[in-house]
Image (cartoon, grey):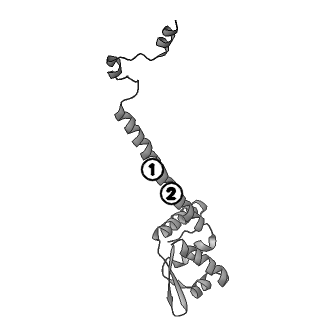
């Protein structure tokens, strides 16, 4: 009886049975790979969308201050130095400099030095287009005069 127990617990393998592959019920390999690529592409696409939305949010954050919109509006036609901007926009010099610095760091404004004067200009035309579109729509909705 002891021998019977040993036989029953020992794995029964024969050369014919060992050579047979075991069939598993799974989807074909090609479909699995396509699904993985699709999920990977979807994930990559989602990361790109997230990055784009993050950049858009940052642009809106920078443009969210009325003072910065005044500066952008003032610089739409030509570059100006800080003194010229201060003549058009009533604020203090330190406040103006802070807003100009923020717009410069956001790559909306460019600047150049001419002697002691620093001149600012718009370098991101998309921001101007966006400002005009939003301001025009608000003016239309509010029956206000809209910018040219």
Residue under the point 53% across and 67% down: 131
- Mark 2 or mark 1: name the one nearer the start of the chain: 1
Does 38 appear above or below 66? above
Q: Which quadrant holds residue 13?
A: top left
Please identify the residue farthest to the top as the structure is shown.
1
Say what secondary structure mark 2 lies in.
helix
Residue that carries the numbered disc 2 in the rendered image: 51
Point out the frontmost of discs 2 and 1: 1
Does 148 appear above or below 33? below
Residue under the point 58% across and 83% down: 85
Q: CA distance from mark 2 to mark 1?
A: 11 Å
User: In the image shown, does 93 or 47 lie closer to the viewer?
Assistant: 47
Does residue 16 appear anywhere in the picture? yes
Identify the mark at residue 44; answer none if there is no mark.
1
Does 47 appear above or below 140? above
Query: What x and y, as percent, mark residue 48?
Result: 47, 54
Query: What x and y, as percent, mark residue 57?
Result: 56, 60
Query: What x and y, as percent, mark residue 108?
Result: 51, 72
Does residue 63 appear anywhere in the picture? no
User: In the image shown, does 78 or 110 lie closer to the viewer?
Assistant: 110
User: What is the total number of numbered labels drawn onto the structure image?
Assistant: 2
Please identify the residue farthest to the front as the structure is shown.
2
Identify the mark at residue 140; answer none if there is no mark.
none
| Few, some or many residues within 10 Å of mark 1 (<14, 14–19, 20+) | few
Residue under the point 58% across and 68% down: 62
Q: Is residue 52 left or right of residue 61?
A: left
Query: What x and y, as percent, mark residue 18?
Result: 35, 21
């Amino acid at each position: 009886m002891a021998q019977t127990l040993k036989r029953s617990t020992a794995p029964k393998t024969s050369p014919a049975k060992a050579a047979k592959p075991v069939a598993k019920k799974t989807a074909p390999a090609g479909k699995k790979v396509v699904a993985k690529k699709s999920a990977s592409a979807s994930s990559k696409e989602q990361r790109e969308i997230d990055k784009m939305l993050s950049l858009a949010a940052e642009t809106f954050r920078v443009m969210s201050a009325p003072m910065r919109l005044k500066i952008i509006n003032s610089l739409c036609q030509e570059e100006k130095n800080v003194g010229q901007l201060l003549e058009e926009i009533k604020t203090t010099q330190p406040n103006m400099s802070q807003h100009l610095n923020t717009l410069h760091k956001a790559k909306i404004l460019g600047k150049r030095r001419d002697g002691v004067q620093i001149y600012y200009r718009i370098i991101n035309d998309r921001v101007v287009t966006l400002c005009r579109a939003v301001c025009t729509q608000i003016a239309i909705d509010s029956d206000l005069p809209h910018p040219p």
